[in-house]
Amino acid sequence: MTTEVSGSNYNAATPNSSSAGGGTNLTSDFDTFIKLLTAQAKYQDPTEPMDNTEYASQLAEFSMVEQQVLTNDNLGSALEQLGLGNMAALTGWVGMQVRAATAASFDGTNPVNVSPNPAAAADEVTLVVRNADGDEVNRISLPVSAEPYDWDGTNFSGDMAPAGDYTFIVESSVDGEVVLSEMAEVYTTVKETQLAGNDVVLINETGFAILATSVTALRDPGAATAEPAAPEEA
């Protein structure tokens, strides 16, 4: 299954290759420089040997390139260790619920808590519910507010939608024209943490990967579903 990442145009299956690509190119240039310098020394004309000043300058360049390669290697290693440290720190999130712009799993019974963030200038807000195939299941009018909304699982006909993964798109309109359309945030349970390049991603129950930096809230699922305590009798 292809892993999609919410909160960023990021492919969790493809590590960040910018630094790696730069290091590869630099190493290639370094190897080429050594070959050229060796060939130049090997095939120089004995009657007109290489100028000492020029040779010293080339050796200095050789040393600079070597230091750059070593610096890049050390930096890459440090970033990798930092990423591993971040992932280890977030393993405590496994089993917790995080709020982020991603798909949510509907169990066919319990409502899904949606956190919309409509445009402040909107005069009409619509919550568009889509199933895993991208088909619209329902369109619900919401107030121009960031107050959470509980989708009860009903479709256009008022019937209960089947259990599955759903996404919630908030459309903000002004004078009948949609000016902003973005995915709403929902709470989902973290099943796994992964390191993708230098980024830590959280895999939720829908199989989506969420950038850890895009999470806006964290809660204990037990506390979220716990029944309120009955009042004690006097």
Image: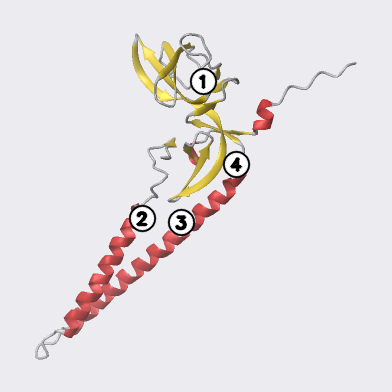
Q: Where does label 4 land, which residue? A: 93
The quadrant the N terminus occupies is top left
- Disc 4 element: helix
Residue 4 in the figure: left or right of residue 53: right
User: Of the numbered discs in the image, which one, if any, rests on residue 79?
Assistant: 3
- Disc 1 element: loop
Q: What residue type is labelled 3?
A: Leu
Identify the mark nearer the N-term, 2 or 4.
2
Residue 228 in the figure: left or right of residue 137: right
Of 204 and 143, nearer the camera is 204
Q: Which amino acid does label 4 sit on?
A: Trp
Q: Looking at the image, is 76 positioned above or below residue 233?
A: below
| Cα separation between marks 4 and 3 | 22 Å
- Which of the two discs, 2 and 4, sits closer to the camera? 4
Determine crowd level at label 4: few under 14, some 14-19, many 20+ residues with C-alpha closer than 10 A.
Answer: many
Q: Which amino acid does label 1 sit on?
A: Pro
Q: Which residue is drawn at 31% across and 58% down?
A: 22
